[in-house]
Image: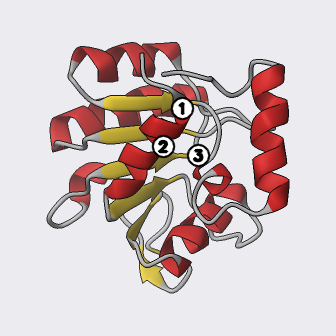
Amino acid sequence: MTDLRTAAGRFLEEKRVAVVGVSRNPAETANAIYKKFKDNGYEVFPVNPAATEVEGAACYPSVRDIPGGVGAAMLVTTPEASAQVARDCAESGVKWVWMHRSFGDSVSEEAVEHLRAHGVGVIPGGCPMMFLDADPFHRTMCWMLQLVGRVPRAV
């Protein structure tokens, strides 16, 4: 097992990131995460099979469809969708997958098991905004959600 901070650092070393679950509604959590990566200099790819454009960028139906692939994928989907996305990520050579869990939940045990079985690093819970240029709110949320078991201490 790796502590969460180390795993988050490894995820954040990947500069090409897919954010799966972005929406045409800019107020959604996935869109805030997408913007945070973009604002921090990442090459970010929105993924949503029901959209062709999100946040002014071409949107891809699947991680498999991103030209040149990505090193990391952030999942802000339902747990049921996360299982299929995990399979797509493993098939596409993604090195790290982070499943969002805060007040909403993208974590699928099936997805976690599949990713680990295929040598993909996985963070089942939390949010990269707790580590990527983190503001006091997100640092506090990380601590509080670890206390109640919604964010893992180790992965």
Residue at image point 19% right, 58% down: 69
User: Which of 153 and 17 lies nearest the eye of the viewer?
Assistant: 153
In primary-sequence order, the first of circles 3 and 1 is 1
**Residue 92 at what x, y percent from top left?**
18, 43
* Distance between the alpha carbons at the discs numbered 3 and 1: 18 Å
Left or right: 115 in relation to 91: right
Mark 3 vs mark 1: give the one in front: 1
Question: Which mark, by number, is residue 4?
Answer: 1
Left or right: 148 in relation to 87: right
Mark 2 secondary-structure assignment: helix
Residue at image point 32% right, 65% down: 15
Task: Tell me which amino acid carries mark 1.
Answer: Leu
Instruction: Write down the residue under mark 2.
Output: 8
Visible residue check, residue 94: yes
Q: Considering the image in quadrants, where does the N terminus appear?
A: top left
In primary-sequence order, the first of circles 2 and 3 is 2
Mark 3 secondary-structure assignment: loop
* Distance between the alpha carbons at the discs numbered 2 and 3: 16 Å
**Label 2 with label 1: CB-CB less than 8 Å:** yes
**Residue 97 at what x, y percent from top left?**
40, 39
Instruction: Write down the residue under mark 3.
Output: 76
Mark 2 vs mark 3: give the one in front: 2
User: Which of 77 and 51 lies nearest the eye of the viewer?
Assistant: 77
Residue at image point 67% right, 66% down: 32
Left or right: 60 in relation to 102: left
Mark 1 secondary-structure assignment: helix
